Amino acid sequence: MGKLGRFACIFVPMALTIASLVCLVLVFSGQLNKDMKLQRDLYFFKADTSDFIDNPDAVKVLNDVNIDNNLLQALQGAAQNAKLKDFYTVGLWNYCEGDQDKDGKETITFCSPRKANFWFNPVDVWDLDNGTSAKLFEGNVQKSLDAYHKVAGWMFSAYVIAIILTAVEFVVGLCAIFSRWGSLVTTIVSSAQTVFVFAAAITSTVIYGSLAGVFETALKPFNIQASLGKQMLSVVWLAVAFSTASGFFWLISICCCSGKSPHKKVSVEKTPYTYERVASPYLGASAGGAGTHPGHQLGNMPSPAHGTSGSAYEPFRHERV
């Protein structure tokens, strides 16, 4: 029952580790396959340009709003050259773009190649690189883009390290079934994994939240909407929850369920050549300390087999066990 109890104690953190690994795999798979709905729905950031006003005469409708004419002209040029699609979704490795029909159904038509340390640059993606590109995004928008560009590398590395440590945690956790030392090592790996998962989650939430906020503010006059991918962030924070819980249970497994049977029999044998008290043939049962018959008299006791002289007798016998 000791090994069985140990296995039951390890099962919970092991299951939580697997759940965290599955969540991280889903994060890595977002936007990698345009033909799978699950991967299409997993994105950090989305820009909806389907309602963009590409008619220069329509600018008059927005006279009450402070509009950046350089950015408006660049976006209109991209729309006229078919460089501006209806929507863009951003994942960890790449982005995808597509069209939207009259019923609002979205169809992804292209996904960019996978790239480490990827970041979504609207100037390049929307082909806005013209003579005024340096002035297209100013103020908070440009600051957010610069911060996003700088942090994207760290964020990608954090996710890579997190998924590697999760896999290592699962492998090392198998050793914890047989030893508390295995639980200790697994707890250390799990703690490091939780730190990187949490760091990656908080970084992606803050940076993409800030990016969506400034895009929504700066591009809303052009009917371009920006939003966070709730499903992707839900998966990310589920990974954090599973990682934290697994680390807690790995820590408990150090102190509980040793794997040894609590009912193991311990036999104690007598050492050879020990002395035991025997009844005296001369003093009777009461003097010898043995529970013999009370009517046993001294005169009825048999004489020693090897004979004695005088009153000599041996009160202890030498017994081999």
Image (spheres, rainbow, N blue to C red):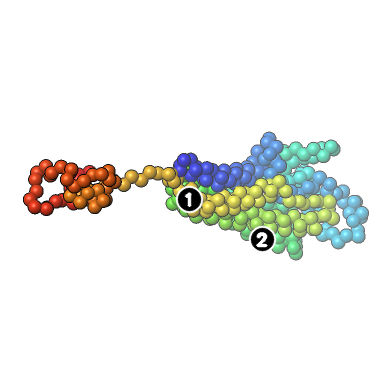
Q: On the rendered image, what quadrant is the C terminus found in?
A: top left
Give the labeled residue for mark 1.
183
Give the number of marks: 2
Is residue 25 visible in the rendered image? The answer is no
Type of residue at label 1? Ser
Residue 142 left/right relative to 190: right
Is residue 40 visible in the rendered image? The answer is yes
Residue 50 left/right relative to 16: right
Query: Percent from the top left, x then y, of residue 294?
Result: 27, 45
Name the residue at 53% across, 52% down: 252
Mark closer to the chain start, 2 or 1: 2
Which residue of the protein is positioned furthest toward the left in this rendering? 309
Viewer-nearest residue: 17 or 219: 17
As drawn, the label of residue 147 is 2
Type of residue at label 2? Ala
Using the numbered discs, state the Cα–Cα distance from disc 2 to disc 1 in whole angstroms: 40 Å
Q: Residues within 10 Å of mark 2 (few under 14, many from 20)?
A: some
Query: Percent from the top left, x then y, of residue 123?
Result: 71, 53
Name the residue at 84% across, 55% down: 221
Quadrant in the rendering for residue 107: top right
Query: Percent from the top left, x then y, of residue 147?
Result: 66, 60
